[in-house]
Amino acid sequence: MVGKDVSPEELFILTLQIFSMRLLVETVEGFERTCEEELEDISENIEVEKRMEGYMVLEAGKEDVFRINYLAGTLNRVLHVLNQFKVEKTEDCYKKISFNVSEFIEADQEFVVKVEKQGCDFSSNKLARETGQKVVDLFKDETGKTLSVDLDKPEMVFRLYIFDDEAFFGFDTTKKSLNKRGYLEKEVDIPPILANCLVRYSGWDGETKLLDPFTKDGVVAVEAARIASRTPNKGRKFGFVDSKYYSNKKYSEIANRINSQMKVGDTGVKGCEKDISNAVRHAESAGVKVNFEEKTALEHSLKDYHVVFDTPFLPRKSKRKLIADYISEFENKAVSSGLKSLTCTSRDPGFYSELEKDDKVVWNTFEAHIFEMDG
């Protein structure tokens, strides 16, 4: 707490030390509040400035960039915002971007500018060219040297996000998306960050037993176990590692401190499926303890469990009725079983008749509804 005897000047300096930068973070549309709750748990210094669909603007300290990237399960990417401006034409990206490029990148480091846009009709290629040229020109003015662009394997990544006419340009501190978990060899039915959001949204406290009755690849169960054990995003090279703006020594200190706080042993998480081979392999690769059992959802007891899952989905109409009938049978079992709670996503809202539909969630091509039942 700040004492009453602190002068306005001292308070201003203290504020600058704590909130030293603006960040744009990407999460799952519909889970913004859930993501915010995780951020509050990661650091008390983080302040949410603005919420958008699937994104939030934060004020945070430099060390929080390390903590968020290393710990966050609900986020996909963390952008260090360098410029925020209105875009009326593509040339505005060249005119309005201004920062000390040499603070972030060396002359021998190749870079790329990647563009994400919503509600904007401008060409992504033109936006990237204008922005990239400004980065090159700024660096040459500062150092007299010319930067090179590498579209395939750049060492440094800058990103331009445009929402309608509002642009955020900055340095990608994450690089390889956090959704690409190291324990997965290929893309799975439910994106890992969505699974992580779903578990947190369900209100699970990490202390009681949790069951994923449709575990398939084990993603929901593994993410729940990662939450319970406070397993960080290990084994990845973040974007800030290559930038001289960030201290790798300080990052190592923070990462080691986080590693020492991990919980070992049983997480109370269980998953069931007829074939658990993929799920077992993924849990082992993630380094978390999950008890998988070769049983169907109808065969496994639900009593005393906190149930969280992604509803099976078959896009082929010829098979959808089979799934719908099975889900209906499972729903009836859940309602009569006396379980603690049930939270799930479903890409077909017509599957459920007794559970309460709440929010809609969107992640890239994944679009679903959340259903809940309190025990």
Image (cartoon, helix red, strand yellow):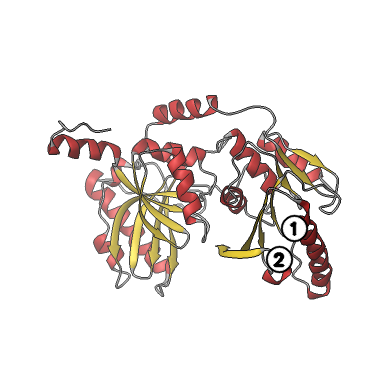
Q: Using the rendered image of the protein, determine whether residue 278 is visible from the camera's viewpoint.
A: yes
In the picture, the disc for residue 245 is: none
Between 278 and 89, the residue placed more toward the observer is 278
- At horizontal 68% and vertical 27% (from top left) the residue drawn is 265
The three-letter amino acid code for the residue at tag 2 is: Glu
Going 78% across and 72% down the picture, which residue do you hit? Answer: 316
Q: Mark 2 — residue?
A: 354
Amino acid of disc 1: Val
Q: Residue at x 19, y 37 (%)?
A: 11
Q: Earlier in the sequence, mark 2 or mark 1?
A: 1
Q: At which x and y percent is residue 98?
A: 25, 54
Q: Is label 2 in contact with label 1 (beta carbons under 8 Å)? A: yes
- How would you rate the neighbour count of disc 1 (Cα within 10 Å): few for under 14, some for 14-19, many for 20 or more? some
Apparent side of residue 112 relative to residue 133 in the rendered image (left or right)? right
Write down the residue under mark 1.
Answer: 335
| Circle 1 SS class | helix
Q: Residues within 10 Å of mark 2 (few under 14, many from 20)?
A: some
Q: Foreground: 271 or 203? A: 203
Q: Is residue 354 above or below residue 155?
A: below
Q: Quadrant of residue 119?
A: bottom left
